[in-house]
Image: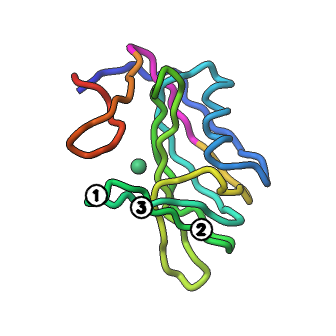
């Protein structure tokens, strides 16, 4: 477990027709923050998400080529290979009321989005490869 102090939280309106994952990373970078957590709601024009298959240890990617509501997008920013890395999951509301979701990938284009971000101050957490899961997880405590 790690403990952090929260810096001043921010709200940001993300720009139409930009990449959601890239834009979240950019907003944190513009605030000089390399660590943080966030929540976002809004809508996307399409989505590119992934599901991690635990047995094969591969991400199965899924493209959704239709508009959807961002019911919830939540995640964190920490370091991976020395650079800020955004880990985000997204729940998408479809036109028939069903929900799809997964790990947010680049290629998800914003229709409209409101981001609530909380930068954190303290030691940087670095992601390292974990043999048990095959994922890049936060290093040992
Ligand atoms: Zn994930």
Q: Is residue 46 above or below residue 38?
A: below
Q: Which residue is mark 3?
A: 51
Q: Residue at x 59, y 68 (%)?
A: 63
In magenta, the rendered stretch is 116-123
Under circle 1, the secondary element is loop
Q: Which residue occupies 53% across, 53% down?
A: 104
For this view, does 127 lie left or right of residue 115? left
1 horizontally vs 80: left or right: left
Q: Is residue 115 magenta?
A: no
Instruction: Find disc 2 in the rendering and name its residue.
Output: 63
Q: Look at the numbered disc 3 and give the secondary structure of its residue.
A: strand
Q: Residue furthest bottom?
A: 96
Q: Which residue is mark 1?
A: 54
Residue 18 location (% of width, % of height)? 76, 49
Q: Badge 2: few (under 14), some or many (20 or more) residues near its Cα, within 10 Å?
A: few
Q: Is residue 4 left or right of residue 70?
A: left
């Amino acid at each position: 477990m790690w403990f952090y102090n929260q810096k001043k939280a921010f709200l940001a309106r993300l720009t139409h027709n930009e990449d959601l994952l890239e834009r979240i990373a950019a907003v944190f970078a513009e605030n000089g923050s390399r660590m943080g957590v966030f929540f976002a709601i809004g809508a996307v024009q399409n989505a590119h998400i992934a599901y991690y298959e635990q047995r094969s240890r591969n991400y199965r990617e899924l493209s959704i080529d239709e508009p959807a509501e961002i019911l919830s997008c939540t995640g964190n920013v920490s370091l991976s290979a020395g650079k800020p890395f955004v880990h985000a999951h997204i729940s998408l509301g479809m036109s028939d009321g069903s929900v799809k979701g997964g790990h947010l990938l680049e290629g998800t284009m914003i229709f409209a989005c409101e981001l609530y971000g909380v930068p954190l101050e303290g030691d940087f957490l670095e992601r390292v490869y974990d043999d048990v899961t095959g994922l890049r997880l936060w290093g040992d405590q």
